[in-house]
Amino acid sequence: QVQLVESGGGLVQPGGSLRLSCAASGTIFTIYDMGWYRQAPGKQRELVARITKSGSTHYADSVKCRFTISRDNAKNTMYLQMNSLKAEETAVYYCNADIVRTYGVRNDYWGQGTQVTVSS
């Protein structure tokens, strides 16, 4: 079994910062691409940032230069440093990962989400 668990969400004022974490656990052989997505009330889930196993990154235009995605392959953990947060970025943030399990099955996994609220 594989689990993705996000943490680090919360309430922050506009202009503030938060750091999200996503820890993968279970019968994992390797993890390929990982990513952060978010879904605001009444809107579709959207890509925030993705990172390959080798560390190549891709960001949504709206978060470039403010957000930084990173990962620690030894810990099967991914991070999202979010700076200069805006009220419109209030959403549930989800972790996603492309995981190969120890017996070779490869699947796409999602975490349960962590709420980020940007408000004064």
Image (spheres, rainbow, N blue to C red):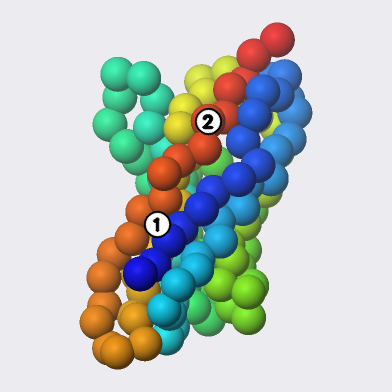
- Identify the residue at the far top of this view: 120
Quadrant housing the C terminus? top right
Give the spatial CA distance, label 2 vs label 1: 15 Å
State the residue position of label 1: 96
Q: Nearer the viewer, residue 61 or 37?
A: 37
Q: Nearer the viewer, residue 36 or 3?
A: 3
Q: Residue at x 42, y 50 (%)?
A: 111
For marks 2 and 1 on the same chain, the one whose residue lies earlier in the sequence: 1
Local secondary structure at mark 2? strand
Q: Residue at x 41, y 44 (%)?
A: 112
Verify CB contact (< 8 Å) between mark 2 and mark 1.
no
Q: Nearer the viewer, residue 115 or 60?
A: 115
Judge whether 94 appears above or below 53 on screen. Answer: above
Q: Residue at x 45, y 72 (%)?
A: 26
Q: Position of residue 21 (x, y in %)?
A: 61, 53
- Identify the residue at the far bottom of this view: 103
Amino acid on which the number 2 mark rests in the picture:
Gln
The 10 Å Cα crowd at callout 2, few under 14, some 14 to 19, many 20 or more, is some
State the residue position of label 2: 115
Judge whether 82 appears above or below 68 on screen. Answer: above
Q: Nearer the viewer, residue 9 or 47?
A: 9
Local secondary structure at mark 1? strand
Residue 51 seen from this side: no
Q: Position of residue 98 (x, y in %)?
A: 35, 70
How many discs appear?
2
Q: Residue at x 35, y 69 (%)?
A: 1
Amino acid on which the number 1 mark rests in the picture:
Asn
Q: Position of residue 49 (x, y in %)?
A: 48, 53
Judge whether 103 appears above or below 2 on screen. Answer: below
Q: Position of residue 13 (x, y in %)?
A: 72, 19
